[in-house]
Image (spheres, helix red, strand yellow):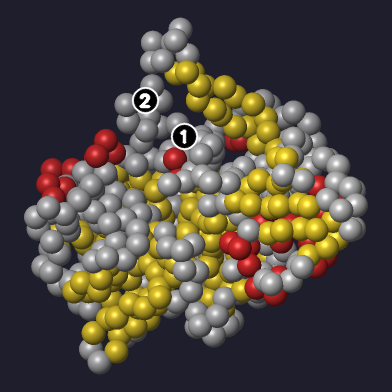
Amino acid sequence: MVTVHLTRHLFSFFPRLEGKEIAVEASTAFEVVQALERTAPGIGFYICDERGRLRTHVNVFVDKQMIRDRRGLSDAVGPGSEVHIFQALSGG
Amino acid sequence: MASRILVGTRKGTFVVDKTGGSWRAQAAGHAGMGVSFVARDPYTGRLWALLGHGHWGAKLSISDDEGATWADAPAQIKYPEGARYIGQDMYADDASDFGIGWRISTRPATLAKLWVIAFGPGGRIHVGTIPGGLFVSRDAGASFELNRPLWNHESRGGDLFAGEGKGETKWFGTPASEGEFAPGIHSIVIDPRHPSRMLVAVSTAGVIETRDGGQTWHSANKGMLLEHTPEPEAEWGHDPHYIEQCEGDPDHVWQQNHTGIYYSADAARSWRKVSVPEQGVHFGFPITADAKNGRTAWVVPGRSDQQRTAIDGRLFVARTDDGGQTWKALRRGLPQECAYDVVYRHALANKEGVVAFGSTTGNLYVSDDGGESWTTVGNNLPPIYSVRFA
């Protein structure tokens, strides 16, 4: 199982996820987002646009490394991986 | 008389009610979120907010309890697979006299901004977006579909779902796209006599009409003038900032354009410029038409496209009651020194003699007498994007 950590910011849109330990079956970052979508319908469109690309101001880390494939999120995740999804520190 | 106003701001939704003879604003959800537009569907009573999350994209939000609680709409606006458009990017070009160049390319469309929502009978909801999409629901918002005849219009290069089209577009961009310089649909006017007849206005292309419920579209820019260009009477390339019709006499349509104020008394078949620059009634973003008298409209003038502020630090609204032949400057109750407000295109409205507008400086003003005198509802609201009567 892959453990997913979400920015608190997303809990304001998906309050039912707050405080829960989120563990999903996935082999890529894209499949992590798909699994999140099944858990919390709509969240996938917060993280990615309608072409499946990671939104410009969102970052995904797999085991502390920022993913490389922002277009397709094909970066591999393994059993025991930890995935963090954050908003980028953009703005001011 | 109108007694509730919905206000969309950079930091949330506000409801403004007239209680005990005075107008009071209170926060009504979306705290900290950008709200491009908020309005009521008069057919269902539901409130709709168009959100622009900086990080998380644009979302449709709905409330069935007058803004006490909001939820993401069950169907969100998404461009369908294969939707592409011809876009332009500015780049540094030392070889150019101006130091910039434009790079044209065909690119996939993804939602940048939800800009305006309009409601029709029979569960029809229309949403104008950036880049340049008109999305239509026929089931009160349970689903939305891109209007393909407008998306594939010859004026923007033809059907790019099917192929490469003509390779050129006459739709240009707007800074309101917040990043890319893409076109946007900000005005949707539905003829109450024949709801299959609609006008949409695009920055930057012009006004476009359908008479068959969106199956075919044609330009409606006759009489518009592109001054300071080699082709002043061009069919395309116009920059309407906002259009609104007289609901009770829909042949009367008003347009605040980048190049001045225009009026049509023949359902947008032709336009006539009715600006009076020497009185300061010329440039601006919003315009609102009276619901009964087609010859009455209000604008909030600004100082030229180079400055875009209240003229000489003195904020005023201008009203015409004779189809733009004369304008009256309405200043009583509005700041007449050190005021540099700019009022966005959706942030002026009228209903039943009440007129309201809000500025990006966070000032919100209401008049209960058609604009003759104004009261201040608030001076410290977030930058105001939209003002609509509920």
- Count residues near mark 1 (Cα–Cα under 10 Å), then give few for <14, some for 14-19, many for 20+: many
Mark 1 lies on a secondary structure that is loop
Residue B335 screen position, x and y as percent:
13, 61
Residue at 31% x, 66% y: name it.
B381
Decide if residue B301 is on the left or right side of residue B49.
left
- Which quadrant holds residue B64? bottom right
Mark 2 or mark 1, which has the lower sequence index?
Answer: 2
Name the subunit of mark 1: B
Decide if residue B266 is on the left or right side of residue B130.
left
Residue at 37% x, 29% y: name it.
B232
Specify the label residue B229 is tagged with: 2
In this rendering, the answer to whether B341 lies above or below B95 is below
Q: Which of these two is toward me, B53 or B317?
A: B53
In this rendering, the answer to whether B230 lies above or below B177 is above
Residue B313 screen position, x and y as percent:
13, 50
The verdict on a common chain for dots 2 and 1 is: yes
Q: Which of these two is toward me, B175 or B255?
A: B175
- Pointer 1 residue: B237
Residue B257 screen position, x and y as percent:
36, 45
Residue B231 makes an appearance in the image: yes
Q: Which of these two is toward me, B302 or B121?
A: B302
Mark 2 lies on a secondary structure that is loop
**Type of amino acid under label 1:** Gly
Q: Spatial distance from mark 2 to mark 1, Cα to Cα?
A: 10 Å
Task: Spot the residue most to the top.
Answer: B95
**Type of amino acid under label 2:** Thr
**Contact flag, marks 2 and 1 (Cβ < 8 Å):** yes
Residue B212 makes an appearance in the image: no
- Count residues near mark 2 (Cα–Cα under 10 Å), then give few for <14, some for 14-19, many for 20+: few
